[in-house]
Amino acid sequence: MRAQPTASHFIDGEYVEDDAGTVIESLYPATGEIIARLYAATPGIVEKAIAAAKRAQPEWAAMSPTARGRILKRAADIMRERNRELSELETLDTGKPIQETIVADPTSGADSFEFFGGVIAAGLNGSYIPLGGDFAYTKHVPLGVCVGIGAWNYPQQIACWKAAPALAAGNAMVFKPSENTPLGALKIAEILIEAGLPKGLFNVIQGDRDTGPLLVNHPDVAKVSLTGSVPTGRKVAAAAAGNLKHVTMELGGKSPLIVFDDADIDSAVGGAMLGNFYSTGQVCSNGTRVFVQKGIKGEFLKRLKARTEAMVIGDPMDDATQIGPMVSWAQREKVLDYIDKGKAEGATLVVGGGIPNNVSGEGYYVQPTVFADVTDEMTIAREEIFGPVMCVLDFEDEAEVIARGNATEFGLAAGVFTSDMSRAHRVVDLLEAGTLWINTYNLCPVEIPFGGSKQSGFGRENSIAALEHYSELKTVYVGMGPVQAPY
């Protein structure tokens, strides 16, 4: 790895330390080993970061979209050149297998910088409105200083998903990663400076639950973008609303994945596994309620069990490993508690359900777990587990499964597997979710919007739509003749 992050924070183009903050120990989830000690931002650090962003933003906004885009695309190129190094850091940060991080984490972040670097001009175009002799025009203007608050499941990707549209639209950003995964965002900040981003436009500060309010409530912050849990989202949205700040919320889910009896069973099993076990189940959009039509339930479970048992659990740095540890000891204990509740409430344990015996006892591992005969009222069917636990539920017909799929406070994602495309489109139209898939699951290329409905949040990440959430529309009326006043 090139030089590791050398301090806790990255502000105004350089590393900054303040050891007066609370100590944050970064642990490697596969072994529990401490790999870095950092400090949470003090109020002074928060002020320094926001001041740097506020100072740098106007000059950046005055640059042409092409000039801004050129820097973002250069950052994408650097990320791709260093993909292996960044992926290894992501694996150390999260515990996710290197076979995942090398194709899904820094590469996704690079895609975001490249996409927004290339679409700025078109995405931020205004309009001309003829009004007879007069006319009007609209233009998109940046918001100013934006705050990004990241989650621990995709730390580098989330940093880029928030930074790229914010910077493309002419804003500055102060980004706070999760205290569980503090390292990756610092390297993203380094790379942006190397790519030519002016100092102060992307700042990274570490923090805990006390740091977020300092950012969200700051009078110089115009927008907050959060990726996190629903309870955290409610608090952040309430605080931001009190000061009328712009907000994007990408929160949790309990998404339905529906498998009709005419589906390709192997594809449906693969989709269900990707939608429950990828990143050790720590994905907000996971289809954790897998509704399988009764006619194929037995065959579906048979193939699912065999493929789950064949998954390789082990050292995340081994290219052969498919399942790594949970991000933390606390998260592992939470998931194991849900597994115990599933057993106690009468669900049938098909496979997994415990701690694998072929890995370090100090690591935060949980076996990929499948429950069948799950009913809607069970705890594991109602609450977000955020771990490798799949719930398989039976259903009889289309109307029933749509009603049951929608019977949740969440609305982040949903999926449908069927060979009947008329039915597929009919069902996704009726499912209450922001992001849906037909005959696949969890694919999130930067070209398409991603986000939820109901309690799963509002606003969208990615695609040209994201630029709308990092800018506001200014309307200008142009009078071409003398003013005719009635007095």
Image: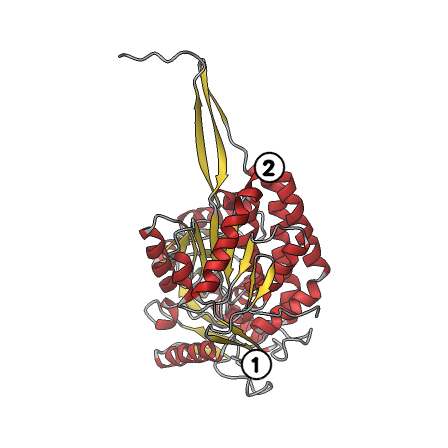
Direction from residue 115 to residue 290 in the image, left or right: left
User: Where's the C terminus, which quadrant?
Assistant: top left
**Residue count near mark 1 (Cα–Cα under 10 Å), binned few <14, some 14–19, many ≥20:** few
Q: In this view of the protein, which residue sits in the foreground, 133 or 431?
A: 133
Q: Which of marks 1 and 2 is nearer the N terminus?
A: 1
Mark 2: secondary structure: helix
Mark 1: secondary structure: strand
Amino acid on which disc 2 is placed? Ala
Q: In this view, does 278 lie above or below 361?
A: above
**Residue count near mark 2 (Cα–Cα under 10 Å), binned few <14, some 14–19, many ≥20:** some
Any part of residue 439 in sight: no
Q: Residue 75 carries which label?
A: none
Q: Is residue 221 above or below residue 128?
A: below
Q: Is residue 464 above or below residue 232?
A: above
Spatial separation of the CA atoms under disc 1 and disc 2: 45 Å
Direction from residue 386 to residue 313 in the image, left or right: right
User: Where's the N terminus, which quadrant?
Assistant: bottom right
Q: In this view of the protein, which residue sits in the foreground, 483 or 96?
A: 483
The residue positioned 40% from the left and 72% from the top of the image is: 373
Q: Residue 121 carries which label?
A: 2
Residue 303 placement (x, y as % from top left)? 56, 71
Q: In this view of the protein, which residue sits in the foreground, 398 or 282?
A: 282
Any part of residue 351 in sight: yes
Q: Which mark is residue 34?
A: 1
The residue positioned 59% from the left and 86% from the top of the image is: 360
The residue positioned 51% from the left and 74% from the top of the image is: 19
Residue 104 placement (x, y as % from top left)? 62, 61
Amino acid on which disc 1 is placed? Ile
Q: In this view of the protein, which residue sits in the foreground, 223 or 368?
A: 223
Quarter assignment of residue 234? bottom left
Residue 369 placement (x, y as % from top left)? 49, 76
Direction from residue 461 to residue 220 in the image, left or right: left
